[in-house]
Image: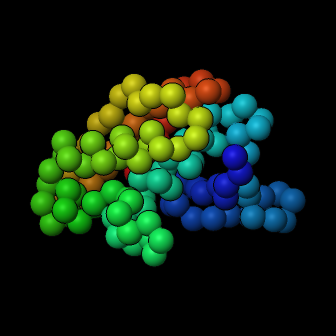
Amino acid sequence: MRTFQTNANNDLFIAPNGNLSIIVDAQGDPQAIAQCCKTAVQAQLGEMLYAADQGVPMMATAFNAYLPAQFEAAARSAIMSVQGVLRVTGFTVQRVGEAFTYSATIQTIYGQGTVNG
């Protein structure tokens, strides 16, 4: 698995070699898989042209209504769909005012990783 790496602001960035930073799971890094999990959770339900039935229903579970159990179920499903994920061992979600956050601890084929959003 190979994917673009993002920083704490969820922005792509330039690596020291002058190219876009890429993270590769072939190096045995569970954070490479965690990066793919974060991307999977960020995919909004209905936004993918050829997979409109996939994605997390953020508007229905986090923004228009706060339904943490439904969000968690959808996010866990998205995470489990990522190659290399064995299980989700922990999940927390909270909304304080306008701020919505989640954190998942995952067990991957390379060890434990964390997904935050």
Corner quadrant of residue 90: top left
Image coordinates for residue 25, horizontal then vertical, percent: 71, 40
Image coordinates for residue 49, horizontal then vertical, percent: 45, 75
Q: Determine the residue positioned at 30% across, 48% down.
A: 74
The image shows residue 23, relative to residue 60, as above or below, that is above
Image coordinates for residue 61, horizontal then vertical, percent: 20, 56
Corner quadrant of residue 83: top right
Image coordinates for residue 42, horizontal then vertical, percent: 42, 59
Q: Determine the residue positioned at 38% across, 60% down.
A: 54
Left or right of residue 9, residue 2 in this image: right
Q: Determine the residue positioned at 72% across, 31% down.
A: 28
Left or right of residue 46, residue 110 in this image: right
Q: Seen from this angle, which residue lies furthest bottom?
A: 49
Corner quadrant of residue 102: top left
Frontmost residue, 115 versus 13: 115
Does residue 69 appear in this view? yes
Image color mode: rainbow
Frontmost residue, 38 versus 12: 38
Q: How many marks?
A: 0
Left or right of residue 6, residue 100 in this image: left
Does residue 113 appear in this view? no
Left or right of residue 107, residue 88 in this image: left
The image shows residue 52, relative to residue 67, as above or below, that is below
Frontmost residue, 78 versus 49: 49
